[in-house]
Amino acid sequence: MDLLELMRLSREKLKPHWGLAFLICLIYGIALGVPSELNSYGELLSFLLAGPLQLGMCIFFLNSANNKPIAIENLMEGFKPLLQVLLAYAVMTIAILVGLVLFLFPGIVVSLGLSMTFFVMAENPEISFGDALQESWKLTEGYKMELLVLYLRFIPWYLLGLLLLVIGVFIAMAWHQHTLAMYYEYLKEERARKEALTE
């Protein structure tokens, strides 16, 4: 698909909600960054918070992408299926680390293949972590390279955000996450289209 057009549409759709989206990403960054700087227990706390907060962000941005009500409370909704979220995040982290240790490329492929896991869980709160991981892998099959390009297109914006007293990073993060939510919807539409053609 036209990724630049997707980014433009995402930016336009997010325009009325920039402030709230920025706040969501800022809270996420502080919640993960501050504890890890304290001590070894802080690093463990950051690890335990990462999955639920990522799911909460996916709920927020998926709601925004689908024109559903959004609120800062969406961030806390990621803690509801707590065990499944923690298991999903742990498996994703281990799989990506193993891929990176073996070779860089497999780690990137695994990361891209599992990147939609929390969007799947956001849309299907009752799904098991294993099914969510598999669903993400199936959705991204044949689209990993395009997804990688989408990630790469945001790197200059993150770098620009660093120059803007770091605050700009969270603006770039909000735009990035919203675009990923829209790309997730695109992947679902593509799969539905392919399934309709095979019937």
Image (tube, helix red, strand yellow):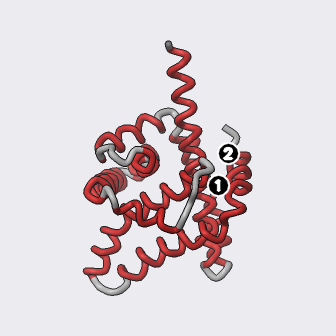
Q: Position of residue 169 (x, y in %)?
A: 60, 71
Q: For residue 133, say whether it is visible.
A: yes
Question: Regarding mark 2 in the picture, which secondary structure is present there?
Answer: helix
Quadrant into which the N terminus falls: top right
Residue 32: mark: none
Label 1–label 2 contact, CB within 8 A: yes
Who is closer to the viewer here, 18 or 96?
Answer: 18
Q: Farthest residue toward the front?
A: 69
Task: Label 1, secondary structure: give it.
Answer: helix
Question: With 192 as the anchor, is 88 left or right in this view?
Answer: left
Residue 90 image-quadrant placement: bottom left
User: Residue at label 2?
Assistant: 3
Front one among 193 and 42: 193
Q: Is residue 34 above or below residue 83?
A: below
Which disc is residue 153 wearing? Answer: 1
First reached walking from the N terminus: tag 1 or tag 2? 2
Q: Relative to 191, is 89 above or below?
A: below
Q: Residue at x 37, y 84 (%)?
A: 37
